[in-house]
Amino acid sequence: HQPRWLAAPRDTITDAYVAARHAASDAYVAYHWRYQPLAKGQPGRILVEATGSGSSFTLRILLPTTAKKINGVTLNGQAAAHRLETIGASRYLVVEANSPIVQVQVTFD
């Protein structure tokens, strides 16, 4: 899943909770996404807390168009390896996690 809350054309969305379940297999995923835009003297921040029935996650986090530089990425409180992907005009930060419960924080200027 690639949440695109930042791409909402009319409203500025800063908080979203999503849960989905596949009844036939009992598989599920849920996440809480929060966005703090850049402010004078303060970096922007995106926080994603996710859980699911699988043993790992690949999180693709849409970056705001205002994000010029990634300052830090943490996975469960530790510095995390990540990569950037561009799809059309959208840039995503991608984090791989080998855990069914994760918290990812991205800070940017």
Image (cartoon, rainbow, N blue to C red):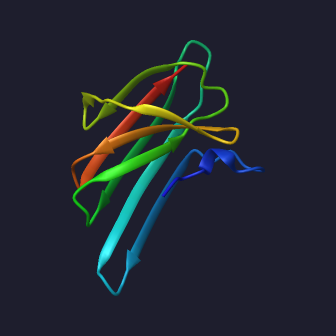
Quadrant of the image for the C terminus?
top right
Occupied quadrant, residue 88? top right
Residue 52, above or below 70: below
Left or right: residue 55 compared with residue 65: left
Instruction: Give how far across and how far down residue 80 sits, in percent.
Output: 30, 30
* Count of marks placed on residues: 0
31 or 95: nearer the viewer: 95
Residue drawn at the location 59% of the way across and 31% of the way down = 37
Residue that protrudes farthest toward the top in the picture: 41
Instruction: Give how far across and how far down residue 50 sits, in percent.
Output: 34, 53
Occupied quadrant, residue 97? top left
Residue 8, above or below 84: below
Instruction: Give how far across and how far down residue 7 sits, in percent.
Output: 68, 47
Residue that protrudes farthest toward the bottom in the picture: 24
Residue 78, above or below 61: above
Left or right: residue 1 compared with residue 23: right
Residue 106, above or below 24: above
Residue drawn at the location 22% of the way across and 48% of the way down = 98
Instruction: Give how far across and how far down residue 15 sits, in percent.
Output: 53, 49
Residue drawn at the location 41% of the way across and 45% of the way down = 48
Left or right: residue 98 compared with residue 58: left
Left or right: residue 32 compared with residue 53: right
